[in-house]
Amino acid sequence: MTLLPHPLRPHMASSGFAVLALTLAPTSALADQVIEAADNATIDCQLSRGELSRIALIDDGFASVSKIASGYPYNDFEVTHEPVRGDIYISVPPLYASDRVSFFATSTAGYVYRFACHLAGEDATQLFITNPALRHADANDWEQQAGPDETGIRLIEAMASDAVLPGFTARAELSRPRRTGAIEVQQVAQYDGATLTGQRFVIRNLGAEPLDLGSEREGPAGALAFAYGRGVLSPGETTSAFLVFASGGLE
């Protein structure tokens, strides 16, 4: 697919794409932890002793929790399921014998997690869990519904407006600037979906003459869609460029 001329972003010159082709842990605190985990993963976290600990799944919810009794019914930790949001709350009494708790939990989306958490601190804690497979499924559904031509165009539009499409993840991706002749290109962001990847670049005209970026209609090999911010780049000016290709890279 080749992106047709767009009122905001017509095609990009092949001279700029010669450079584009070459370009090619979560923070944790006791009171607020964010952990990325896959299905069947073991999650090591910190829970409170003597206070409540909340565990929440991002874009999912807990359906059930399985644990064994400690043998001390009046001094065992308790797990409470909150059915509205699907969160679970862990209550560990101050005199609980061990410094760790362990249990299994199943989500409404069918993922199973094993928790092996140690006890630290007396303040209430929160743990948020993200599963990349959920984003991948959302992106795959959206890409299949929209179709390959529309997804490429809409991904470019999303990158141009700093928006994120369903299931896609966006991150800053600063590469070392690459220069070919009077053109300097630097990647600044990447958008990853189920089958498509989008990249955003900054193009600079370092020369003394205007650059006609729209004079060529061909993108790099393997590109599904490409666009740029303006057709002509005056000396000293910059513009954005956008590239979409199948996940896995350019051919």
Image (spheres, rainbow, N blue to C red):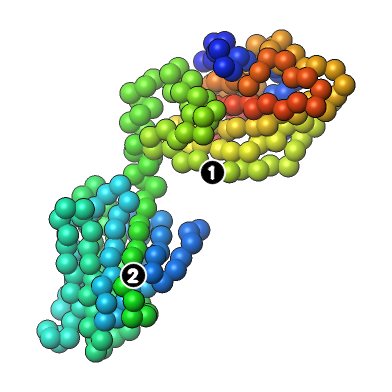
Name the residue that disc number 2 marks.
125
Residue 171 is tagged as 1
Q: Nearer the viewer, residue 1 or 241?
A: 241
Position in image of residue 226 (x %, y %) = 59, 21
Left/right of residue 43 with respect to residue 236 in the rendered view: left
Q: Where does the image place residue 86, in percent across and percent down from the top left? A: 20, 55
Residue at point 50%, 58% (across, down): 25
Question: Is 68 in front, or is 51?
Answer: 51
Three-letter residue code for mark 1? Arg
Residue drawn at 39 percent across, 20 percent down: 147
User: Mark 2 against mark 1, which lies toward the viewer?
Assistant: 2
In the picture provided, is 1 more to the left or to the right than 231? left
**Badge 1 density bin: few <14, some 14–19, many ≥20, Cα 10 Å:** few
Against 195, residue 102 (above or below) is: below
Q: Residue at x 63, y 26 (%)?
A: 241
The answer to whether residue 164 shows anywhere in this view is yes
